[in-house]
Image: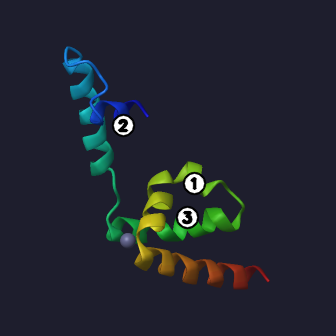
Amino acid sequence: MTAMNVLRGSVAPDNRPLLRKLLGMLAITAERELTCEEAATLLDYYVDLEGRGEDVARLLPELAHHLRICPECEEEHAALAAIVAGELV
Ligand SMILES: [Zn+2]
């Protein structure tokens, strides 16, 4: 929320150090976006946790986020989850 306010220019111009800090944080967040390759590496683990009823969105937030924005990985995730579900029956 604070970052959005900065981007909309509602932070005073003399507050530059804060602005720089926030923009730095945003840049770091962007760098933390997973690639599809990294997502695929984590997917087995993710589905395993999910199958055990763990809170995957909290444990692997980067991957949970990637699955929301990447249809290909989400498809892969759905296929793996279906296999895991089948094994549990
Ligand atoms: Zn992906």
Q: Earlier in the sequence, mark 2 or mark 3?
A: 2
Q: What whole-number distance in Å separates the C-alpha atoms at marks 2 and 3? A: 31 Å
Nearer to the camera, 49 or 76? 76
Where residue 36 sits: x, y (%)? Answer: 34, 70
Contact (Cβ within 8 Å) of mark 3 with mark 1: no
**Camera-side mark, 3 or 1:** 1
| Image quarter (top left, top right, bottom left or bottom right) of the N terminus | top left
Q: Which residue is mark 2?
A: 4
Q: Callout 1: helix, strand or loop?
A: helix
Query: Does mark 2 have its CB less than 8 Å from ligand 1?
Result: no
Q: Callout 2: helix, strand or loop?
A: helix
Q: Residue at x 56, y 84 (%)?
A: 79
Q: Which mark is residue 57?
A: 1
Q: Which mark is residue 81?
A: none
Where residue 26 sits: x, y (%)? Answer: 30, 40
User: Which amino acid type is shown beneath numbered disc 3?
Assistant: Tyr
User: Which amino acid type is shown beneath numbered disc 1?
Assistant: Ala
Nearer to the camera, 42 or 19? 19
Q: Which residue is mark 3?
A: 46
Q: Residue at x 79, y 83 (%)?
A: 89
Q: Dividing the picture into quarters, in which one does residue 52 lie?
A: bottom right
Quadrant of picture, ligand 1: bottom left
Side (left or right) of 42 relative to 23: right
Contact (Cβ within 8 Å) of mark 2 with mark 3: no
Side (left or right) of 10 relative to 68: left
Judge whether 70 appears above or below 83 on screen.
above
Side (left or right) of 49 relative to 66: right
Where residue 37 sits: x, y (%)? Answer: 33, 70
Where residue 47 sits: x, y (%)? Answer: 59, 69
Q: What whole-number distance in Å separates the C-alpha atoms at marks 3 and 1? A: 9 Å
